[in-house]
Amino acid sequence: MLEITCCGSPYEIGFQHGSQAKELVHGSIEFYEDYFQRMSKMSWATAEDVAMKFRPFLEQHVPHLVEEMQGIADGAGVSLPAVFALNARTEISMGMMDDGCTSLAWKGDDFSVAGQNWDWEAAQKARLVILHIKPNQSGIAPRAKISLATEAGLLSKSGLNSHGVAVFVNAIKAAGVKFDALPIHIALRTVLDCESRLKAIARLLSLTLGTSGHIMIADKTGGTSLEFSHLDIIQMEMANGQIAHTNHFLAKHDPAVKDSHIFPDSITRQKRIMLLLEQARQQEQGIKAPAESFEKMLEDEEGFPTAINRKSSPIRQSETLYSFVADLNKRTARLRLGRPNECEGVWEFKPVEL
């Protein structure tokens, strides 16, 4: 898994990402060109045109991220619309993407942990990158340093910043998109620019999201689920210090929004992860390493192959490509590449030390 340290201005950060991961960015474009055609009969040229409809909103509200995407494009030798299309990949097909994941968070008396398995088509595992981002420090408020995992060419996926704010994502399939809002993968990066869970929540509630999905935001004070469509955002808080989410709506949304339940196993995975969390809570006094306990939960194979720890099969091509767990009191995280019980490599994240 390619690991890149990016420093400087937003453009310089993007250029370092794009130039060092040039072949992988081209691979991501090839993958999504094929994917859009397979899933929605959409050409890549059309996907670029659709994605660029987000540009006016993004230039107004997150201009530094537009600069970073320009840097990625120039570094990789691709067009800016191509990078927009990658970063709006979930929205491009009108809310028709179907990657699955399981996210969870747990707050105890003396710990706070959060994590996820990220599930997607196996071909993209080869295009995953780790980015360590050290922005120029200018102005009154220092910008957060960030360590994250993502697909090459995309601004973010799972990550942790130097303030101890972590973010995780789950797909939910419900048709509809709006362009005066944040695409999901740009929203994930927006969270990692924030100083706390509460500030990140306020930022996303203010800017809203372009299509359906779920984002979990966590820090040492706990975790929050934001479940959203292109029409609304519903904020869900912990119960008994715990929260988890898979790939279907748990809350009631605007009547015009229809959840397609893309994964029949999403409901069973939700029940299973909540059971594992409850079992862990009941023996909380005996748990000395909550992050390791989380990692074990993410190895769970009940319902295999469509389990929390998934395997590609004729039932569903998606499988677990990485497992990411953050210890939010320590402001550290650990990523395991591949299915976590068949680990292909381990990376430690300590953005506060960048």
Image (tube, helix red, strand yellow):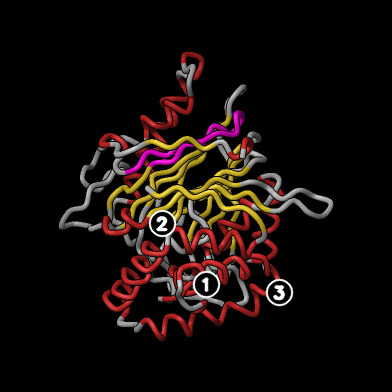
**Are the residues flagged by discs 1 and 2 in contact, CB closer than 8 Å?**
no
Say which residue appears at 55% left-offset and 47% top-offset. Answer: 132
Q: Nearer the viewer, residue 218 or 245?
A: 218
Mark 3: amino acid: Gln
Kind of element beneath mark 2: loop
Farthest residue in the right direction? 140
Viewer-nearest of discs 1 and 3 = 1
Report which residue position mark 2 lands on. 248
Cα separation, mark 1 vs mark 2, equals: 37 Å
Report which residue position mark 3 lands on. 60
Residue 293 place in picture, x, y as percent: 42, 26
Q: Quadrant of residue 170?
A: bottom left
Q: Earlier in the sequence, mark 3 or mark 2?
A: 3
Q: Earlier in the sequence, mark 1 or mark 2?
A: 1
Q: Quadrant of residue 345?
A: top left
Structural crowding at the residue carrying mark 3, measured as other residues with C-alpha within 10 Å and reported as few (<14), some (14–19) or many (≥20): few
Residue 331 place in picture, x, y as percent: 60, 34
Say which residue appears at 48% left-offset and 85% top-offset. Answer: 49
Give the magenta part as a residue range. Answer: 323-337
Q: Earlier in the sequence, mark 1 or mark 3?
A: 3
Farthest residue in the top direction? 286
Structural crowding at the residue carrying mark 1, measured as other residues with C-alpha within 10 Å and reported as few (<14), some (14–19) or many (≥20): many
Q: Is residue 333 magenta?
A: yes
Mark 2: amino acid: His
Viewer-nearest of discs 1 and 2 = 1
Marking on residue 74: 1
Kind of element beneath mark 3: helix
Quadrant, the C terminus: top right
